[in-house]
Amino acid sequence: MHTAFPDSRLVHELLLAIGRFDRAFHSCARRSLHEARKPGQALLLFRLYHHGGTARMSALANSLKVSSPNITQVVRELSARGLVARGPDPNDRRATLVSLTEQGRAAVEEMRAIACAATEKLVSRLGEEQARTLIALLGEVEAFLLEEAPQDAPPCRPGVCDKEYHRT
């Protein structure tokens, strides 16, 4: 762990680099959203896909660290477009299950293929050594951000996360 106070120029350069990365990453991500249209929708579709295609709405809200109203809104939008279906949980009538439809599964697989192709290009451009260094550095950044996040931070409110994600 570094204890010396960093050079203010270095801090400024890092802030600018993070901002440029953020804009470029989100620009690339928006191009691969396909049917999802919004990042929050894509995240929910991917989470369902990795849960075997079905999950409780409350479990989705918890795993995505968003509020129940936010999940309800996103599920409603995806359901209206035929990407997910809602139904009662046979084990708990108070709970709602969300399931990927065939159209939703196809959308996730297409988004995943686009993301993998872009990542393969990045690895080719960087080379194995730099790609592994990037993985390690991103892990350090993630650990730092998780340490710095307030423990009592409220979950995302409906629409806020997607608006933040799309800022330019």
Image (spheres, grey):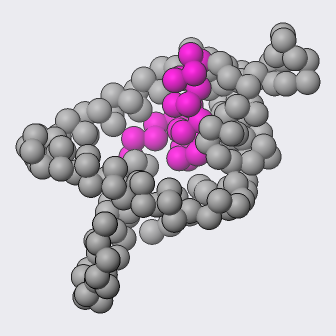
Instruction: Kindly tell me whether residue 69 is visible in this rendering.
Output: yes
Could you tell me which residue is drawn at 70 percent across and 61 percent down?
Answer: 152
Instruction: Kindly tell me whether residue 76 is visible in this rendering.
Output: no
| Residue placed most toward the observer, 5 or 118 | 5
Tell whether position 56 is magenta: no
Residue 69 left/right relative to 161: right
Number of labelled discs? 0
Please state the horizontal and vertical placement of residue 73, each as a whole percent of the image.
75, 43
Residue 40 falls in which quadrant of the image? top right
Q: Residue furthest top?
A: 90
Location of the N terminus (image quadrant): bottom left
**Compared to 156, does 95 lie above or below?**
above
Could you tell me which residue is drawn at 28 percent across and 82 percent down?
Answer: 4
Please state the horizontal and vertical placement of residue 136, each as a whole percent of the image.
25, 49
Residue 92 left/right relative to 156: right
| Residue placed most toward the observer, 26 or 129 | 129
Location of the C terminus (image quadrant): bottom left
Residue 102 left/right relative to 2: right
| Residue placed most toward the observer, 118 or 2 | 2
Please state the horizontal and vertical placement of residue 98, each as a whole percent of the image.
71, 24
Q: Residue furthest bottom?
A: 8
Could you tell me which residue is drawn at 25 percent across and 87 percent down?
Answer: 7
Please state the horizontal and vertical placement of residue 128, each as a whole percent of the image.
10, 40
Q: Which residues are magenta?
A: 31-53
Could you tell me which residue is drawn at 65 percent across and 18 percent down?
Answer: 54
| Residue placed most toward the observer, 37 or 125 | 125
**Compared to 89, does 21 lie above or below?**
below
**Compared to 159, does 124 lie above or below?**
above
